[in-house]
Image (cartoon, grey):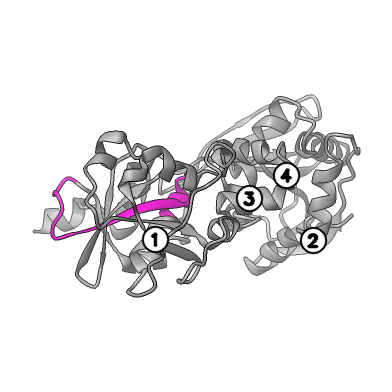
Amino acid sequence: MKGKVLFSPSPLETLDRARNDLRIGLPICIIDNAKCWLIFSIETISFERFSNLDENSEFCITEKRARTLKTIPYFKNIGRYHLDKTKGIQWVKAVADPVRDLNYPMKGPFTPIRTGSADAHQLGISICKKAKLLPAIIAQQVDHVDKNITSISTSAKELINFDENIVNIAAANLPLRISSDSKLHVFRPVNGTEENYALEIGSINRADPVLCRLHSACFTGDLLGSLKCDCGEQLRKALQTIGEEKQGILLYLNQEGRGIGLANKMRAYALQNQGFDTVEANHRLGFEDEERDFEIGAKILKELGFKRIKLLTNNPKKINMMEAFGIEVVKRIPLKTELTPENTNYLATKVKKSGHFN
């Protein structure tokens, strides 16, 4: 018994295992008041598993997605609906993925479920978000589950946004064009999710406010030079500013697409090509307009000994989040970028709908 306690996964580790299972198309079991619910990601469910669902299965989407489909969600943040298997797997995948809306324009009518507990369904949606999957699930109540299926309780919902400790697993000097006196730190969350990076430039007095940039990863802008956003230009200007100051820190956080992941960002881009702005596209996908969590950034700063910063940002939410997590922002330094025909609407939406400084 002692060995079982020592070596069995904790509730938080089981939750992380559930996230990975959904990504590879496996179901998970969520237990709600002794009721067992098999939960499948609509994005990753296979044809074989879909074919074996029973007639009492249901599908669930977020309130944001439900509103765009002109159906009423009767539960907090989600809608539950009876699943008509005769419509086929491609139909239910189109319900989850708005990029398919033009190919499946007539999806309804939907048959909503209005009673009962939705705790298991809400937790399933939240795990999908953590897995960077479309926030849409199929749920089937069962009497028992295979022992090989990962099982968690709805009490795990209290852990879903728990930001675990991070470990500075590696660091080395890294001479750059902006400064030969620089060091790169690699931080890994103990739950095994994406690593995050801290670039420290110069010899910094920890007692003084440090020039700091919190930069969310943008593969398309940072690496490919995309013109649809200003991320790459912001990254380069932040590095230039820190280099000119001869000291500062840049955090590179793996929160692609405002926290929804690269695949979902590409779906959002496809929707933008249809005429939706960046916030509307996120909502059609079922996400909030902002899914990032900057607590990880505050933890990295504290781990490196920084408590006061001069923040390079146009985003007031970053300031508020840093203050909320115990990092004093003594000054905001704006990052001005160039307007182009490709990014004008994107930047205007950030100001109008996301509250960014102009």
Q: CA distance from mark 4 to mark 3?
A: 30 Å
Which residue has dot 4 on it? 249
Which residue has dot 1 on it? 81
- Residue drawn at x 77%, y 44% as measured from the top left: 248
Q: Nearer the viewer, mark 4 or mark 3?
A: 3
Q: Nearer the viewer, residue 296 or 17?
A: 17
Q: CA distance from mark 2 to mark 1?
A: 34 Å
Left or right relative to 291: residue 21: left
Left or right relative to 171: residue 88: left
Q: Decide which of tag 4 and tag 1 comes sooner along the chain.
A: 1
Which residue has dot 3 on it? 282
Q: Nearer the viewer, mark 2 or mark 1?
A: 1
Q: CA distance from mark 2 to mark 4?
A: 25 Å
Quadrant location of the N terminus? bottom left
Q: CA distance from mark 1 to mark 3?
A: 22 Å
Q: Nearer the viewer, mark 4 or mark 1?
A: 1
Q: Decide which of tag 4 and tag 3 comes sooner along the chain.
A: 4
Q: Amino acid at mark 2?
A: Gly
- Residue drawn at x 24%, y 53% as measured from the top left: 55
Q: Nearer the viewer, mark 2 or mark 4?
A: 2
- Residue drawn at x 64%, y 41% as measured from the top left: 268
User: Quarter-wise, where is residue 36 in the image?
Assistant: bottom left
Left or right relative to 91: residue 171: right
- List the single residue furthest toward the left: 1
Q: Amino acid at mark 1?
A: Tyr
